[in-house]
Image: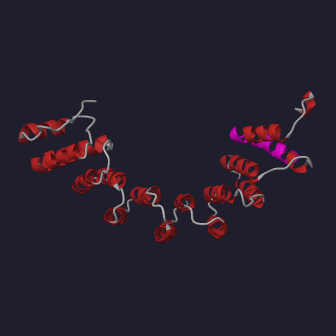
Amino acid sequence: MAEKGIDYNMNTLNIRLYSYAATSDVDRMERLLMKMETDPLVTLDWHGYAAAADAFLKAGQLEKTAALLRKSEQLINSETRKIGYEHLMTSYAAIGSKHEVYRIWELYKNMVGFYNNGYRCMLSSLLKMDDIDGAEKIVEEWESGNKFFNIQIPNLLIKVYCRKGLLEKAKSYVKKLSEGGKECCPAWALLATTYHMNDRMGEAVETLKMAASSASRPGWKFDNSTLAACFEYLKQKGDVEEAHELLILFREREIRLIVVHPQVLELGETGNRMEGIDEVQD
């Protein structure tokens, strides 16, 4: 800009910095960053360094990422601590620096306070590093102190349990939440799909019924392939009664089947028990 006779200010420099960061043009970004650091008229903030750190992270330059995260932390003040520390936890997790994640977490708790989003951020960071033991401790800490329950926090742990094949842990935790009166329809549905993917169809049917039973409002959507597999399983067993009970439960909870599967129709014809069920052809 200067060589074209165009004056620059903080806004134009920041726009260029963020533009280079967004496009992963780390060479230009680094040169601009050095220029801004040496210019007495320019004041960088924590977010500028954080954006540059993200760009280096995408480029796989982890040492430079860590160096810029340290600079970013030094510029965080009382007004930006919450969002700044949350960003740092996520960024340090991305480079696998568990020590730094825990260090920032202690600062967060001591200087920011108890926020659901902070716990969600810390939990997500630990799970990203496969620290399930640490994640479980964070959830226990959150459970003992939260004033406003947020299902997104336990759901993060449940999803990882399912992805890792820790289905007994997942089921036990969802059951605990359900018995405590929490909305667990999505978690039960995820379990049903995971059981289906692991060819544990008896448990898939069981947890699908739990999902439908816990739906607190109409309109829940379930994985269509899981529904089809569950009805196919019941058809193979010849268990028309259980299939009918499941369909009745869907009707009572105002959960609509988006597709009428052949498995459902065959069960209905066999048992003549489909009357009154509202399915919709896709």
Tell me which residue sits at (27%, 42%) in the image.
255
- Tell me which corner region of the image, top left, top right, bottom left or bottom right, holds residue 206: bottom left
Q: Please, is residue 35 above or below residue 147 in the view?
A: above
Quarter of the picture holding the C terminus: top left
Q: Please, is residue 114 above or below residue 6 in the view?
A: below
- Pinpoint residue 157: horizontal percent, then vertical percent: 45, 60
275 part of magenta stretch: no
Tell me which residue sits at (48%, 61%) in the image.
148
Give left or right: position of 58 versus 186.
right
Which range is magenta? 21-35
Give left or right: position of 126 versus 164.
right
Between residue 55 and residue 272, name the one nearer to us: 272
Tell me which residue sits at (51%, 62%) in the image.
130
Give left or right: position of 39 versus 188.
right
- Pinpoint residue 265: horizontal percent, then vertical percent: 15, 36
- Pinpoint residue 186: horizontal percent, then vertical percent: 36, 51
